[in-house]
Amino acid sequence: MEIKKYIKNNSSALKSSVQKGGVSTTLFFNNTTNRFEKNKELSNIKSPKKSTSSFSKMFSNFKSSSFFKMTLKEQTFFIKRLSFLLKAGIPILESLTMIREQTRQKGLITILDTVINDVSSGHNLSTSLGKFHKIFGDFSINIISFGESAGILSDNLTYLAEELKKKNALQKKVKGAFVYPAVVTFATLGITGFLMVYLFPKILPVFSSLHMTLPLSTRIIMAFSDFLIHHGLELVLGIVIFILVFIFTLKKVKIFRFYFDKLLMKIPMIGEVIKHYNLANTTRTIGLLLKSGVTFGETLEITTRVSGNLVYKREFEAMSEAVNRGERISVYLAKNRNLFPEVLTQIISVGERSGNLSNSFIYLSELYESEVEEFTKNISNLIEPALMIFMGVLVGFIAISIITPIYSITQNLHG
C-alpha cells in the first residue's frame, strides 16, 4: 500500500517533525512519559479525596460530552495526527500524550485526559472514546474498534480520517451552495421591511389628505405597512417562537421528522440533491466498513444508526432484516427505485457476484459525490432567475403602489 511505503520511508522525518523547541523526539517522549508518571503518582498521593475527585471527573466528563462539540474538521485533524504517530512506531499512550500536550481546546483536553487515563489502565481506545459517543459517533468508534481487534488500528485511522475529510468537504459544498440564495432572499425581505416601516409611512399622510379612491395595490401596501408599524414586534416574536418550536419538534418527535424528510425529498431539484447526498454518505460508510473488515450485518446496523435522514434510516433497518433472512441486498434495493436508483442496484449486484462489495459501494459514493458537486456548482445559475423574478415582482409591486396615486394626482392638477 502506498501509505505504508510512505510511512516506512519517511518514519525518521515523521519523528523529527514532532520535535518541540529543538528537543529531540526521544527526549520529548521521555519527558512526556516522566510527566505522565508524576501525574499518576500525585493522583495516588491524593487518595483520601478519591470520592471528591471521582465526582469531579465524572462531572467534567459529563460536561464535556454534553456541551463540547468537535467539528468534522477537528475530528479529522485529531485522528490523522494519531494515525501518523502510530505509523511512525510511537506507542498509543505516548501518541495520545503528545497530542494532549499540543492541544489548547479545553473540551478536547478533558476528553484526552480521560482517554489517556483509560488507555494507561488497560482499556481499548474505542472503549474510552465510547464514553464520548455523541461526539465521535458509532461509525468512527466501530472503525477504531475493529482496527484494534484486527491489529490494523493505524490503517483504519487513516481510512477514517479520509472519510471524515470527504464528508466534511461534501457538507461544505452543499451548505455553501445555498448561501447566495439565502443572502439575496433575506436582503430583499429586509429592504421591503425598511420601505414598509420607515419610508412608506412618510408618504401616507399625503395620500390620506387627498380624500380620493386609491388603487388596490396602494391600499394593500398601506394596510400591510400599518400592520407592521403597530404589530411588527409581535410578528417577529411569533416567527421566532414558531421557528424554535419547529426545530424542537423536528429534533424530538421522530414521526414529524420522518414526514418532514419525506416532504423535502419530493421537492423538485432539492429532493434529488438530498437523495444523492444521503446516498453518497451511506454508500461510503458501508464501503469503508466492509473494507475495514466489519461484517455486512454489523455494517448495515451501524449505517442505520449513523444515517441522519429518517426515510433512509427506516429503509436500512428493513434492509438489515431482509439480509439477515438471507435475501440479497440487490434484490431488496430493486423494490424501491424512488430511494435507490437503478444504477445503484446494478453496480451492487455486480459487486455481489464478484465478491467485491466494498469497492462497489466506494465507487457509488464517488459517483454520487460528483453529482452533488456538479449541482452545487450550478445551483446559482439555476436559482438566480427565480430570485430575480421574485425581487422584481416584489419591488415592482411596491413601486407601482407608490407611483400610481402620484400619477393620478398630477393628472388631476393638470385637468
Image: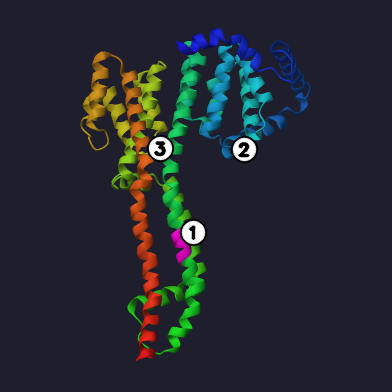
x and y percentages locating residue 64 in the rendered image: 61, 35
Whether residue 117 is visible to the viewer of this picture, yes or no, is no
x and y percentages locating residue 182 in the rendered image: 44, 52
User: With respect to residue 77, does 123 lie above or below?
Assistant: above
Q: Nearer the viewer, mark 1 or mark 2?
A: 1
Q: Residue at x 24, y 28 (%)?
A: 343
x and y percentages locating residue 67 in the rendered image: 59, 40
Q: Which quadrant holds residue 20?
A: top right
Instruction: Identify the element where label 1 is drawn.
Output: helix
Instruction: Identify the element where label 3 is drawn.
Output: loop
- Looking at the picture, which amino acid does disc 3 mark? Gly
Q: Residue at x 34, y 91 (%)?
A: 415
Circle 3 crowding by C-alpha within 10 Å: few under 14, some 14–19, many from 20:
some
Q: Quick one: 116 or 106, which is closer to the camera?
A: 106
| 375 to the left or right of 13 | left
Instruction: State the separation of the CA atoms marked 2 and 3.
Output: 24 Å
Circle 1 crowding by C-alpha within 10 Å: few under 14, some 14–19, many from 20:
few
| 333 to the left or right of 79 | left
Instruction: Identify the element where label 2 is drawn.
Output: helix
Q: Quick one: 274 or 370, which is closer to the camera?
A: 370
Query: How many marks are shown on the rendered structure?
Result: 3
- Looking at the picture, which amino acid does disc 1 mark? Val
Circle 3 sits on which residue? Answer: 308
Pointers 1 and 2 in contact (C-beta within 8 Å): no
User: With respect to residue 146, does 305 lie above or below?
Assistant: below
Q: Which residues are magenta?
A: 187-192
Circle 2 sits on which residue? Answer: 63
Instruction: State the separation of the CA atoms marked 1 and 2.
Output: 28 Å
Membership of 271 in magenta stretch: no
Circle 1 sits on which residue? Answer: 240
